[in-house]
Each structure stands twice: as structure tokens, then as C-alpha cells.
Image (spheres, rainbow, N blue to C red):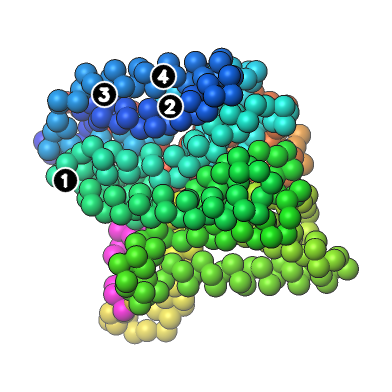
């Protein structure tokens, strides 16, 4: 509730809202069908393969989620649902999305902490793995990882809006409380349905193409689930390395599509090709992919490598930029290629996509901020020249949010890097894997693995959650002031 103003507090503090636990709990309970969607298909696949421990470990939480939803189905979310309550609910839904399926990974032999890491990596569409021998897993376990990544890409964020909640204040609040400050998550039921429809359509197209060029329909399906969600788990320990050139190319096309704003495809389906191009997402993604691929190929060919090695290097840089995390060969730990890959992971895909990273549109805005600062120095003191994008002034709140996100990202990288250095990890590979974690990429130089120290494994698990929700929602959730009532 809103508190009265006190001279001992700033204005922002005195009017700040606190999250109401019963409202947050009801919001999460309304998301119960998501956990059915998350667990039931892999449970059925495991049952078909007769992997009964895995099937049971997934069927039980699916059944509990159905029961929970039946209990709260007739209760409506209050119209007074606040932004802070929506934020913490979304953060908790993603956390539960990692915790609920974690026992399934334990059922196939992973220790509890490794199971949590693997589950968090899946639901946050990261793709880093601490499995010792994934080739020995039943294929149902690979489907579980791919399915979780696909759900984490968009379904976790939009299914309730699209299928369950009627239009109104709660739906709008939840729609604006998610990743990308509402750019990815629809604010209305119809918009959410459009985005889910596009997501399903792109997945189906990619799956059909992948099944035609990859060995076996099962591998094609799982790779497609990971690619369109810009994740990175592969049913093979060598990721994409053992696939054909055509197979790698098809997968990369899916990754590029997943890194564009899904609104681009919505507009295309509506016959608004000019509007789709004017949106700018396709230009930003395709242009950056072209530039970075050319740089990567030039570097690799310039050092005496073959055209095939250059192609694999291009696959790696596209995977890094789209934050997909597939690899077509070994990842270098030093040199210009390693630096290029880290820069690509830091930038990430575009706003409105399933990709991670800082986002291309935001990087472009940062560049405009620098140019604006230089130009402003040449203007007279009384001149009014606001920063503009597409001829429209940029709101100060947008700039503040961008600078806050950049500051938190850099601080998190620094803290995690110091932790890894304290354990004796080499600086370059440690920095690479940390950026990969926070940007939810999944590429690794070998630092991330089953032998990670417990504290580092916990920190990176938390970092994947942070990165997927772009920091703010998680920080709001763990802040005591979110929950404490002030007199």
C-alpha cells in the first residue's frame, strides 16, 4: 500500500509500493498450467521410452500443478495488481521453472546441485552444461532439455496472458513486467496469442527443415527447439561439429530468426512488409551478422586456415551473437577470435526476440548517447537538443534504465570474474564463460563443467537467472524493501 510522506525519507521511498504476498502467491498459482506444459510432454516421451524414473519425476509435479490450478481457477487476480507484484511473480515463475523439473535430472543420475544448474540452464535458454556424459543419457532427457529451453524462450512469459487471463489490468501488468521491460511480452491477450502463434510457426518450419537435413527426426526436433529459442543444448556432446555443412547452415538460419523481434514476423503475416522492415530489428540483426561473419572469416582465413574452418568459425560467431550457444568446433581462449566472440555475446540479439545479451537496439542507443555527448559539447549553453531516435526524443527514463542495466551487467561480470580468479581459473577462459552465462549464451571454453567448485556453480546458476530476467526483476524480488511494511 502507499505510505504517507515523511521528512526522513526521499519522495520515491515514501510513495513506494510493497508486494503483497497473497497476491503474488495467487499470481504464481494462476501460472500453474505453465508447469503442466513444461513437465507433461517430456514425461510422456520418457514413458514411451520406458524411462520410468524420469517419467515419474516429471508426471508428479505436472499432476500437482493441475490440482493447484483447479483450486484457484475461480479466483480472479485483483485489478490492484501492482508492477512490483507482477515483476516478482515473473521472477518466481522462472525460478520455479528451474526447481520443479530439477528432480528429473536427478532421476538420470545427476547430483542435486548439478541437476539444478542443468535445469536453470535449460529454462533460461542458456545451454551451459555440467553433465559428465550426456551421450549416455536416454533421448528423453535430451528432449527434456530442448523442451524446457523452448518453453523458456517465450511460453513461460506469454502462455498465461494468451490462454488464461482475460484482458484487463492484471494482464497488462504481467505483460509489461517481463523480460525487456515489455518489449517481448505482450500487454494484451490478442498480442500474446499472435506472438505464440509466430513462435509455434517458426518452430514448425525450422523443425521440418532440420529433420530433412539432420540425421534422424528426433535430433532435428530437439535442435529446432533449442535454435528457435536461441538456446544451445544439443543431443550430441560435440554440439553441431559432427553435422553436415547444410545442417549447420539450416540451424543457423533458425538462430538468426530467433534473434529478431517476433513482432517482425507478426507484421509480415499481416501483410505489412514495410512496417516489418521499418521496425528495424531485421536490419540490425542481419547487418550485424553480416559484419561479424565477414570479420570472423577474414581473421580465420588470414591465419592460413581452410574454408571449412572459416565456415565453422562463422557458425560460432553467429551462435554467439544470437546467444544460441551451439558450436561447430573448439572455442579459442585467446586472440582476436576470442575477443570477437565475447563482444558478440555481450551485444546479443535484438529487443523483442528470445535472445539474451545487452541487445542490439540498446547498443545502438549507447552509440547515439556517445555521439550526442560529443555534439552537445559544441552547442551554446542555452541550446535545447534532446537525444532522438527515429526523430523522436528519447525519454530520460529509457536512458536511465539502459545505464542501470549496463552498470549491473558490468558489476556482475566483475564479481563473478574475481570469484573464478580466486579459484585459480585462467583469466581469459573464465571471463569468456562468465559473459556467456550472463548473456544466456552457452558457449564455453571448458571452464564450466562438472568439476566446478560448489560456490562457483551456485553463483553461475544465480547468474543465469539474473541474465534471463535482465537483473531488475530478480533484484526487486530479493530486496527486503519489496516485502517489508514501513510504519
Residue 461 horizontal/vertical position (percent): 55, 32
**Distance between mark 4 and mark 3 Cα atoms:** 12 Å
Residue 450 falls in image quadrant: top right
**Distance between mark 1 and mark 3 Cα atoms:** 19 Å
Disc 2 designates what residue? 40
Q: Which of marks 1 and 4 is nearer the N terminus?
A: 4
| Label 3 element class | helix
| Residue at 21% from the left image edge and 43% from the top image edge | 171
Please give left or right for residue 358 compared with residue 325 in the image.
left
Q: Earlier in the sequence, mark 4 or mark 2?
A: 2
Along the line of sight, the residue nearer the viewer: 247 or 179: 247
Along the line of sight, the residue nearer the viewer: 375 or 336: 336
Q: How crowded is mark 3: few (under 14 residues within 10 Å), some or many (20 or more)?
A: some
- The region drawn magenta spans 391-400
Disc 3 designates what residue? 69
Q: Earlier in the sequence, mark 1 or mark 2?
A: 2
- The label number, if any, that marks residue 61 in the structure image: 4
Residue 274 falls inside the magenta stretch: no
Amino acid at each position: 500500500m502507499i505510505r504517507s510522506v515523511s521528512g526522513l525519507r526521499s519522495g520515491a521511498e515514501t510513495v513506494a509500493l510493497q508486494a503483497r504476498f497473497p497476491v503474488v502467491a495467487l499470481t504464481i498459482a494462476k501460472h500453474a498450467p505453465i508447469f503442466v506444459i513444461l513437465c507433461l510432454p517430456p514425461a510422456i516421451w520418457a514413458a514411451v521410452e520406458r524411462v520410468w524414473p524420469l517419467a515419474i519425476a516429471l508426471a508428479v509435479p505436472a499432476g500437482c500443478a493441475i490440482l493447484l490450478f483447479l483450486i484457484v481457477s475461480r479466483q480472479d487476480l485483483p485489478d490492484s495488481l501492482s508492477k512490483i507484484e507482477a515483476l516478482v511473480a515473473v521472477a518466481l515463475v522462472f525460478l520455479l521453472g528451474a526447481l520443479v523439473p530439477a528432480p528429473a535430472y536427478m532421476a538420470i543420475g545427476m547430483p542435486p546441485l548439478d541437476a539444478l544448474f542443468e535445469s536453470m540452464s535449460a529454462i533460461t535458454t542458456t545451454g551451459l552444461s555440467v553433465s559428465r556424459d550426456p551421450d549416455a543419457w536416454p533421448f528423453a532427457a535430451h528432449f527434456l532439455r530442448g523442451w524446457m529451453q523452448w518453453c523458456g524462450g517465450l511460453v513461460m512469459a506469454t502462455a498465461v496472458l494468451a490462454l488464461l487471463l482475460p484482458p484487463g489490468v492484471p494482464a497488462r501488468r504481467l505483460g509489461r513486467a517481463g523480460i525487456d521491460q515489455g518489449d517481448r511480452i505482450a500487454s494484451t491477450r490478442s498480442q500474446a496469442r499472435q506472438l505464440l502463434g509466430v513462435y509455434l510457426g517458426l518452430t514448425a518450419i525450422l523443425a521440418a527443415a532440420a529433420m530433412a537435413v539432420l540425421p534422424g527426426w528426433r535430433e532435428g526436433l530437439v535442435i529446432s527447439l533449442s535454435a528457435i529459442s536461441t538456446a544451445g543444448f544439443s543431443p550430441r556432446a560435440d554440439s553441431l561439429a559432427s553435422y553436415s555443412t547444410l545442417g549447420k547452415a539450416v540451424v543457423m538460419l533458425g538462430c538468426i530468426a530467433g534473434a529478431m523481434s517476433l513482432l517482425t514476423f507478426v507484421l509480415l503475416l499481416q501483410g505489412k512488409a514495410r512496417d516489418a522492415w521499418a521496425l528495424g530489428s531485421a536490419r540490425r540483426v542481419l547487418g550485424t551478422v553480416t559484419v561479424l561473419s565477414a570479420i570472423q572469416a577474414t581473421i580465420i582465413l588470414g591465419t592460413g586456415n581452410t574454408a571449412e574452418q572459416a565456415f565453422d568459425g562463422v557458425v560460432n560467431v553467429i551462435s554467439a551473437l544470437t546467444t544460441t550457444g551451439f558450436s561447430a568446433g573448439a572455442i579459442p581462449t585467446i586472440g582476436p577470435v576470442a575477443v570477437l566472440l565475447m563482444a558478440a555475446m555481450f551485444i546479443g540479439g535484438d529487443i523483442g526476440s528470445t535472445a539474451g545479451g545487452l541487445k542490439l537496439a540498446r547498443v545502438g542507443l549507447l552509440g547515439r548517447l556517445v555521439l550526442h555527448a560529443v555534439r552537445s559539447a559544441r552547442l551554446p549553453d542555452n541550446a535545447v537538443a534532446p537525444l532522438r531516435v527515429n526523430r523522436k526524443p528519447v525519454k530520460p527514463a529509457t536512458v536511465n534504465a539502459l545505464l542501470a542495466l549496463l552498470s549491473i551487467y558490468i558489476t556482475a561480470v566483475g564479481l563473478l570474474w574475481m570469484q573464478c580468479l580466486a579459484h585459480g581459473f585462467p583469466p581469459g577462459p573464465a571471463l569468456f564463460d562468465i559473459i556467456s552465462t550472463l548473456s544466456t549464451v552457452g558457449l564455453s571454453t571448458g571452464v564450466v563443467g562438472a568439476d566446478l567448485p560448489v560456490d562457483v556453480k551456485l553463483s553461475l546458476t544465480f547468474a543465469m537467472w539474473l541474465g534471463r530476467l535482465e537483473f531488475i526483476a530478480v533484484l526487486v524480488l530479493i530486496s527486503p524493501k519489496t516485502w517489508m511494511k514501513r510504519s
